[in-house]
Image: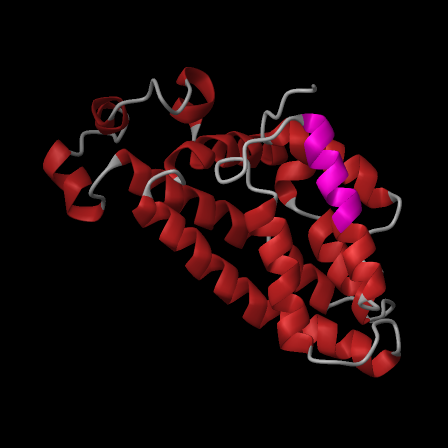
Amino acid sequence: MKLFAEKGYEQTTVLDIVNNLGGLTRGAFYHHFKSKEEVLLALTEKMYQNHNPIDAAKKRTDLNGLEKLRQVFLSQPGLTDSPEGKSIATLNRAALSILEQPRFLAEQFKGNQMQVSVLTPFVEEGMKDGSIRPGNAKLLTELIMLLFNVWMLPTLFPMEAEDFMEKAEIIAQCLDALGCPLMNEEFEDAGEAFAKLLDIKPS
């Protein structure tokens, strides 16, 4: 993480990583990782495990299902100005470059499938407590993930900041029409932060 933050992901080499492993050899590195890209993915996963907004939302007994779902999206650690948030933002920007490779794009889709399984219970809860219109919770969650994690991904659909924010407004209208008013005014600030995180330039 230190190397990626100081030198930049593209400029950091496997040799740089090996030289900072406290005496471990290149062979030891390749015993665990096939490439620098795999290090990035493992590091990103570890950071999210340590700062998992889903676990925090599950513990909130004062929120309904919709509010819990909203908290998950608004509490992404990479959107904060904390040192840890900035570190995760660094990883996310680096991860975008490798998502252009089919293998890592496939990993992204697998991750989306896992997120659907953990987010669907929040949607089900919302449908039971009335904060989300009753329907097929799994399909609605799949649509939310498709819109946020695929349509909004600039490696798949290159965009400028104005396009990014317009897409967010379209998503808000779609979800409102489906009875899931997920995106409130807090999402506008979060959207601007996310565009900055992804290094999307203003038009």
Q: In this view, does 96 lie above or below 170?
A: above
The secondary structure that dominates the magenta segment is helix
At x 66%, y 27%, the residue is 196
Question: Would residue 25 appear left or right of 113 to someone viewing this image?
Answer: left
Q: In this view, does 47 lie above or below 181?
A: above
Nearer to the camera, 196 or 33: 196
Residue at x-position 21% and y-position 47%: 32
Residue at x-position 70% and y-position 56% = 72
| Residue 156: x %, y % from top left | 49, 40
Picture coordinates of residue 144 (x, y %)? 66, 60
Instruction: State which quarter of the image contains the N terminus.
Output: top left
- 127 left or right, relative to 33: right
Q: Could you tell me residue 31's position as x and y percent?
A: 15, 46
Residue 81 showing in the rendered view: no
Residue at left offset 28%, top offset 34%: 36
Report which quarter residue 194 is drawn in.
top right
Queried whether the magenta region covers residue 147, the answer comes back as no
Res. 12 visible in picture:
yes
Relative placement, left or right, of 174 versus 130 is left
- Give the magenta-colored segment's residue range: 161-170
- 34 is higher (above) or lower (below) than 55: above
Q: Which of 193 and 25 is in front in this view?
A: 193
